[in-house]
């Protein structure tokens, strides 16, 4: 029996991700996106929060293919400024395939009838409004790209360029970027800023769970709690390979 025959398909996928991550180390973000599009074709999507630094990844994607699906988790708890910024970027970048993925209406009515689940159980609220909606829409894809960076720290500090979470490949074209890289790219391409950035929000999610922060990090997200991630990168019992590339 060969080594490959002895490996479980999940292990083969993890090995593919690790090998791709190693080969893509130091490559330009556009090359990483192009690799993913070549590897997974129409089974590859972008997931964007249209938050503070989202314009960079979306601009990179638009230079390659404006019709790559861009999934936006419409939680019904976004700042009005985020929705306006989403529409501005769609127009500005010419994105033609933005998918607004909402929570299931019946689940929302049953699990959050008063609309205040975020106050009582933020993990359950994120599961209802982010994790399960994303799982549903991603059932049609093999790989998705995120805008996460290692400098954001926490669980992201050792982020690989390509991961396999047991179900999907996750592509992180900006993993190696620094805050200076983000600022330089934004200035070079004259990309519009999220309107809340100048009001002291370096990271922007749903309005109930986002506060201004002094440092350029995610400390304003679920501030005052132990929670640092909504669960779309850590939940569902899926295994995520965070192999250093
Ligand atoms: S970030 Fe807050 S409001 Fe948004 S889904 Fe999670 S708990 Fe709910």
Image (tube, grey):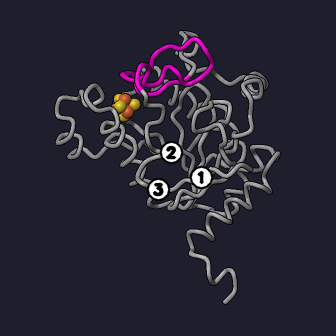
Residue drawn at (72%, 42%), measured in percent from left and top?
A: 63
Cα distance between the residues tagged 2 and 3: 9 Å
Q: Is residue 91 left or right of residue 78?
A: right
Q: Is residue 209 left or right of residue 115?
A: right
Residue 131, x across and y down, in percent: 39, 45
User: Is 212 in the magenta?
Assistant: yes
Q: Under tag 1, what secondary structure?
A: strand
Eye-nearest disc, 1 or 2: 2
Farthest right residue in view: 26
Q: Are dots 1 and 2 in contact, CB under 8 Å?
A: yes
Could you classify mark 1 by the number of other residues whose Cα lies within 10 Å: few (under 14), some (14-19), or many (20 or more)?
many
Farthest bottom residue in view: 1
State which tag comes first along the sequence, 1 or 2.
Answer: 1
On the rendering, which quadrant does ligand 1 occupy? Answer: top left
Magenta segment: 203-225
User: Is 122 in the magenta?
Assistant: no
Residue drawn at (75%, 45%), measured in percent from left and top?
A: 30
Cα distance between the residues tagged 1 and 2: 9 Å
Q: Which mark is residue 170?
A: 1
Would you place residue 75 above or below residue 188 in this image? Answer: below
Front-most of residues 81 and 181: 181
Residue annotated with mark 3: 238
Q: Which mark is residue 233?
A: 2
């Amino acid at each position: 029996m060969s080594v490959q025959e002895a490996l479980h398909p999940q292990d083969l996928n993890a090995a593919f991700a690790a090998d791709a991550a190693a080969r893509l180390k130091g490559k330009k973000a556009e090359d990483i996106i192009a690799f993913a599009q070549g590897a997974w074709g129409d089974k590859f999507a972008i997931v964007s929060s249209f938050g503070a630094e989202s314009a960079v990844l979306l601009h990179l994607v638009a230079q390659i293919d404006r019709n790559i699906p861009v999934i936006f988790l419409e939680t019904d708890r976004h700042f009005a400024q985020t929705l306006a910024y989403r529409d501005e970027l769609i127009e500005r970048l010419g994105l033609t395939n933005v998918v607004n993925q909402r929570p299931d209406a019946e689940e929302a009515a049953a699990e959050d009838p008063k609309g205040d689940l975020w106050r009582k159980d933020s993990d359950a609220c994120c599961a209802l409004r982010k994790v399960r909606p994303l799982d549903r829409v991603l059932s049609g894809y093999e790989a998705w790209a995120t805008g996460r960076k290692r400098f954001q720290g926490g669980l992201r500090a050792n982020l690989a360029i390509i991961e396999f979470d047991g179900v999907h490949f996750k592509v992180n074209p900006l993993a190696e970027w620094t805050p200076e890289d983000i600022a330089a790219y934004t200035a070079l391409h004259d990309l519009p800023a999220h309107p809340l950035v100048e009001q002291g929000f370096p990271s922007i999610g749903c309005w109930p769970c986002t506060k201004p922060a002094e440092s350029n990090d995610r400390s304003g997200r679920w501030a005052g709690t132990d929670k640092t991630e909504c669960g779309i990168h850590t939940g569902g019992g899926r295994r995520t390979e965070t192999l250093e590339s």
